[in-house]
Amino acid sequence: MGISGLCLVHCITTTVLLTVISSAGGLLNPAIHEVGLTLAILMGGFALTRGVMSHGYMAPAVVGAFGIGIMAGALSLPHGDFEIFWTLVGVSLVALGHDLNRRATY
């Protein structure tokens, strides 16, 4: 139960931290979005591929890859409400992919 609680804290903290960083990207250097997407592609690709190799289920990787694709598409939109909406949809799908990956492993 303690580890589940730590997982919950980790997930919430990561979500808040990524939201703050992406919001600050407009105030700082706009390239922070491209760097963040590149890191998401690299880390997500590694984790989701590792999961497929571990448990053999493709669904988590497909959901996560779809989310990364939506994030990349949102990056091409002009700054505004739709960019934020699609970025959050993409991030949520990546998080769902990671959760499905974790559940398939156990």
Image: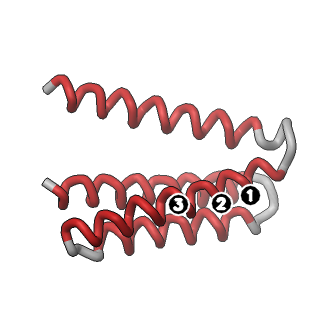
Residue 67 picture location, percent across and down: 49, 65
Q: Residue furthest top?
A: 2
Of the image marks 1 and 3, the number of the one nearer the N terminus:
1
Tag 2 secondary structure: helix
Residue at 22% over, 73% down: 57
Q: Residues within 10 Å of mark 1 (few under 14, many from 20)?
A: few
Instruction: Give how far across and how far down residue 17 sits, in percent.
Output: 57, 33
- Of the residues tagged 1 and 3, which is closer to the observer? 1
In the picture provided, is 49 more to the left or to the right than 80?
A: left
Nearer to me, 22 or 84: 22
Q: Residue at x 69, y 58 (%)?
A: 83
Q: Which mark is residue 71?
A: none
Q: Name the residue located 55 percent from the left edge and 52 percent from the top edge.
A: 88
The residue to which callout 2 is attached is 38
Q: Label 1: state its secondary structure.
A: helix
Q: Where does the image place residue 23, in percent across and percent down from the top left?
A: 71, 39
Q: Could you say which disc has been placed on residue 34 in the image? A: 1
Q: Label 3, on which residue?
A: 90
The N terminus lies in quadrant: top left
Which amino acid lies under the numbered mark 3 shown in the image of this protein? Gly
Label 1–label 2 contact, CB within 8 A: yes
User: Mark 1 belongs to which amino acid?
Assistant: Glu
Mark 1 to mark 2: distance in Å? 6 Å
First-in-chain label (2 vs 3): 2
Task: Reply above or below: 15 against 56.
Answer: above
Distance of label 2 from label 3 (alpha carbons): 14 Å
Query: On the rendered structure, is 10 left or right of 76?
Result: left
SS under mark 3: helix
In terms of image quadrants, where is residue 28? top right
Front position among marks 2 and 3: 2
| Residue 103 figure quarter | bottom left
